[in-house]
Image (cartoon, rainbow, N blue to C red):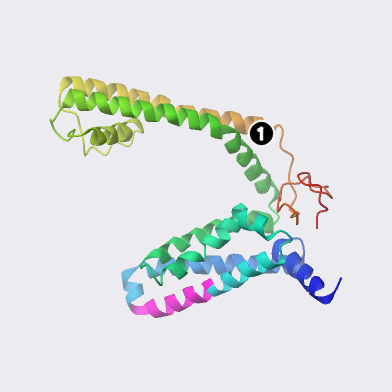
Amino acid sequence: MDRTETLKHRLYVIIFEADTPAGKAFDVGLLIAICISVLTLMLESVPEIAAEHGRALRVAEWFMTALFTVEYGLRVATSPHPLRYARSFFGVVDLISIVPTYLSLFFTGTQVLTVVRSLRLLRVFRILKLAQFVHEAHTLGIALRRSFRKITVFMGAVVTMIVILGAVMYLVEGDRGSFSSMPKAMYWAIVTMTTVGYGDIVPTTPAGKFVASVVMLLGYGIIAVPTGIVSAEISAARTQAAKPNRHHCPNCTSDDHDPDAQFCKLCAARLT
């Protein structure tokens, strides 16, 4: 292994692994920088603070963005499979956490989107060796993936109900009150069915109030369905998911491995 490859491997261990002192120090420093960046963004949104310290806050934001840009470049350069890292969850988050600041040069206000950097704080569970939290996050991820198709079908049925109920309310209420179009009636159906109840659009006829009562009762049942689906999948996932360790696979970028694993169970590559 030549000097360049040795340096690349050392940087990979520091940037991607959290088991070594250098790796942990790097990640902790990164988390602190993320917190400072998000805090800077929040302070800049306060008119009084922005008026007095706006320039300093913008300089701090650009400094943090430069650091994150260098860090992203190092991750791409040291990863054995840059495209796999770039397409992974954290790879996408790392990229979109620096893009808004550069976009603010052309589109005013887009720097607010840098708040997505807070998603990078999810690494704290892996960095601080909170294995139980990693396990629970893994279990939740499995449950959400298994629930996706069921919830998609359910949401399709809900959208269909909203369209029908909106049409019914538009027919019943006619031009009375605020039900002047089907989109407004559908908006009312969404607000009522989700039990939000803004009250900006209300039925005035007896028939409309009856339909509204039915929609309110349906709302309670609709809220319970996705909760039950996800709860059932979480229960099933807990019986199957093994506690993961924190080893990062250099081949497929997976972090989901058994505590004593030496090889990746997804691609069979040796773990670092």
Residue range of the region highlighted in magenta in the rendering: 52-65
Residue located farthest toward the front when viewing the structure as drawn: 83
Q: Nearer the viewer, residue 183 or 47?
A: 183
Q: Where does residue 15 sit, x and y in percent of width and height?
A: 70, 66
Name the quadrant containing residue 17.
bottom right
Is residue 192 rendered magenta in the image?
Answer: no
Q: Where does residue 256 sit, x and y in percent of width and height?
A: 72, 47
Q: Which residue is mark 1?
A: 237
Q: Where does residue 245 sit, x and y in percent of width and height?
A: 75, 49
| Left or right: 10 in relation to 102 | right
By secondary structure, the bulk of the magenta-drawn segment is best described as: helix
Which amino acid type is marked by label 1? Ala
Name the quadrant containing residue 54.
bottom left
Q: Quick one: SS at disc 1?
A: helix
Residue at 54 percent of width and 31 percent of height: 149
| Left or right: 230 in relation to 166 | right
| Left or right: 127 in relation to 176 | right
Q: Nearer the viewer, residue 137 or 187?
A: 187
Is residue 61 rendered magenta in the image?
Answer: yes
Q: Is residue 214 above or below residue 81?
A: above
Q: Is residue 45 above or below residue 250?
A: below
Name the quadrant containing residue 56.
bottom left
